[in-house]
Amino acid sequence: MSSKIYTKTGDAGQTSLIGGTKVPKSHLRIQAYGTVDELNAYIGLLRDQFENTHSREMLGEIQDRLFTIDSSLACDPKKEISMQIPDLNESDILLLENEIDWMNTFIPEMKSFILPGGHMIVSTAHICRTVCRRAERTIVELKINDSLSHPLIVKYINRLSDYLFVLSRYIAHLLGVAEIPWKARQKG
């Protein structure tokens, strides 16, 4: 018999971090890992729309790293040192940078801001990018409050948003979809 998904322990608006510390469900740490979880779900949606094997595998790797980040964010920073939490490495950031550089060899130089859109998968990549930026803002707030124990999380999430932007442009290139340049309305 499988265990029940509901525990009723959060019915009063509290939840437990890894390590047992109780915090309100509105706590900044919960918002941070909740937003990373949301990002992971959107990246799954993006990955499901992709036919390119290399990019699908890369997005799967990113989803795995996001679970690593979620593990760290969900842990009480005072107790994390004694726990077996998966680790984020500088090589994870280097992988994103290498992918960005590689995709940039295929796409034209940007001459204006680009509006999200043109194709469902391009728009999905832009949604991933904006959710990633929101996660970054929340995680930076944790860092400011000295509540972030892993120094590479902000760097990884920052680089990931860059990757997702370039990926949206690369997808448009692969599909032969014209990017939509933003043309500022002239005052008149």
Image (tube, rainbow, N blue to C red):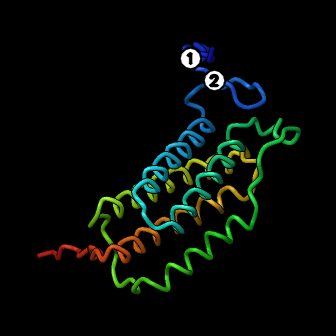
Image coordinates of residue 120 in percent, x first then y, are 30, 59
Left or right of 88 on screen, residue 158: left
Which is more foreground, mark 1 or mark 2?
A: 1
Q: Which residue bears the numbered disc 2?
A: 15
Q: Please determine whether, in this image, residue 92 is positioned above or below residue 113.
A: above
Left or right of 152 on screen, residue 63: left
Quarter of the N terminus within the rendering: top right
Image coordinates of residue 186 in percent, x first then y, are 17, 76
Is disc 1 surrounded by few (<14), some (14 to 19) or many (20+) residues within 10 Å?
few
Occupied quadrant, residue 77 = top right
Q: Please determine whether, in this image, residue 34 is positioned above or below residue 176.
A: above
Q: Which residue bears the numbered disc 1?
A: 6
Say which element carries label 1.
Answer: loop
Q: Residue at x 26, y 67 (%)?
A: 118
Quarter of the C terminus within the rendering: bottom left
Mark 1 to mark 2 CA distance (whole Å): 13 Å
Nearer to us in this view, 41 or 10:
41
Q: Residue at x 66, y 70 (%)?
A: 95
Q: Please determine whether, in this image, residue 139 is positioned above or below residue 14.
A: below
Nearer to us in this view, 52 or 127:
52
